[in-house]
Amino acid sequence: VFESVLGAIPFDQILIQTINGIVTGMILALVASGLTLIFGIMDVVNFAHGELFMLGAYAGVLILSATGNFWLALVCSSLLIALLGAAIYLVTLRPWLGRDPLTTILATFGLSLVLQNYALWQFGPVARKIQEPFTGHFDLFYLQYPWYRLVIAGAAAAIIGALWLFLKFGTYGIWIRATTQDRVMAEAMGIPVPWVLTAVFAIGSGMAAASGVLFGPLVGVNYAMGTDWVLKAFIVVVVGGMGNLGGSILAAIFISLLEAYASLWVSPAQAVIVSFVALILTLLFRPTGLFVPTPK
Amino acid sequence: MSERRHRVLFWAGFCVVVALLAVAPVVLPEFWRRFLTEILIWGLLAMSSDILIGYVGLISFGHSAFFGLGMYGAAAALMTTRPPSLWLALLYGLVAASAVAAFVAYFSTRLRDIYFAITTLIFSQIFYVVIFTWTEVTGGENGLTFSRPALGIPGLFSIPFTPSVLHWFVLAVVALSYLVLRRITQSPFGMVLQSIRENEPRTRAIGYPIERYKIVAVMLSGLFAGFAGVLYAFQNQFAAPDFVFFLVSGEVVIYNVIGGIGTLVGPIVGAAFFLLLREGLSRFFTEYYLIPVGVIFIAMVIFMPQGLLGFARRWLNR
């Protein structure tokens, strides 16, 4: 009996879905860590984050078609969207920072409407394709698994690792952490807090853009692609604990794995419900987030 | 004396507005009559959301779920019974919307501020995905079409819903809902809700069970949102998953902010302003009207957070 149960489990499919889940999980972690960084440091819930992701992907399309170099597109698009993020922050958020966080939800929601429709107007409803930088495959059971997917996971991990090192050891990273802990004290110590906040918003935007470019080759670039991602990133950020970088990364992989396994049995559109249920259970039993130490 | 004068003025104003809206379908051409009915329905939805935003201080991004469930509930009644019954449609729609509201309220009211907004958003997406993918029952992406019931009381009278009759019916529902909601917000219950908005820890310290008050507020809000959904089903004779998508909730929040939160009539004015703006702008910007609308919305959030009717807030709530 035991052997027949063991035989019924499709180990090959589970392994494939594990790899798929980790790949999307790393992209999601990249999106969510930008979101949680922005939230953790300035209490701004950035509804327009998905739109920055989408615009980043479009910027990648344009730069790629102009230069033909994927990695150049990745870097330039991140820088470009980081600048856009800084501009958005300076114009719509910074002058009103002391206000209720709910005001910033509304402002960024309006922003996401504007940006999304701008993309629709500028680029049209047809999805654009980003050519992946290399097309090699390796054999995985009955599949030809593209190397590029593993490279995405690696690149996302590298960016997140670089961010972590920067926050931990870089002078400006220490400024950012100091501002998160106590804004007034940081200002008293001579840290230019307004510029730190602007820089954080720019970094978060750049990370969203980088994930957009990396993810582009898998699905095609579309004006509405940001909406799905921002919703998923919200789930991740709440499940991982708001403003907690490590928690969001773990939660991103956890949620993506759940969805990947669920899509073995149901359609991917319905697999989303699994992550919704994970969110509800988290809110019920650990409202502070799954991956944070229990508050004393 | 001043209290009495205020009351006379308020009721006079109320009667004038309702009378104007009642006369409108007789004089207006077909397009604008339909437009006006639509404004009233969206206004009712926005008003239901105002209970949470304006009086409890919770921003709901999940009202599309209540609205949509009201719509699909009415659709279920209209499609299964022959001949379609108005009252059964209302019953099904309201029961569906309040059941969903109870479910959402139970989970989401444990959280505050941003967390509440995100949770309601995610919940409405759950219902969206379920409705979108459960094609056998909900018609999936194509939605459901059905026919309008007749307005009547069984055994007494029955008249068909012409556009004008429908308009009057909607107007009656919206006007009554306004009076009921206004009464509720002025009641001791409403006062507790407002004190939760002003200072939650202190309200808790006084001894009010805050969670219970919030759950009731969300359910009440969901009930009226479901009512709007039923009316919309009567008006358009179809139900589609697009109305459950969270962007609808976002538009409802926009109506509230534009019109002025915490006034109940403000959201209706906001809905009218938004829909007129959309109508006007879509002539120049075709389908991209959301770009200028979004810009105006951001500007209003920043420079005019009290909205169009915010100046009259105290007067209207007295």
Image (cartoon, coloured by chain):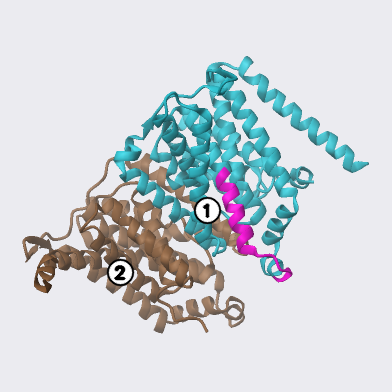
Chain colours: A brown, B cyan
Rendering coords of residue A225 (x, y %): 33, 50
Q: Looking at the image, which is closer to me, A173 or B153?
A: B153
Q: Residue furthest front?
A: B155
| Chief secondary structure of the magenta portion | helix
Q: Residue furthest right?
A: B1
Q: Residue at x 45, y 71 (%)?
A: A285
Rendering coords of residue A35 (x, y %): 43, 64
Separation of disc 2 and disc 1 at Cα? 32 Å
Screen quadrant of the N terminus of chain B = top right
Q: Residue at label 1?
A: B102
Q: Looking at the image, which is closer to me, B36 or A34?
A: B36
Q: Is residue A71 left or right of residue B90?
A: left
Q: Is residue B15 above or below residue A32?
A: above
Element under disc 2: helix
Q: Residues within 10 Å of mark 1 (few under 14, many from 20)?
A: some
Give the total number of marks visible in the rendering: 2
Amino acid carrying label 1: it is: Ala
Rendering coords of residue B22 (x, y %): 66, 22
Q: Which label number is shown at residue A253?
A: 2
For the residues tagged 2 and 1, is the chain the same?
no
Amino acid carrying label 2: it is: Ile
Q: Residue at x 80, y 30 (%)?
A: B12
Element under disc 1: helix
Q: Is residue A247 above or below residue A65?
A: below
Q: Which residues are magenta?
A: B205-223
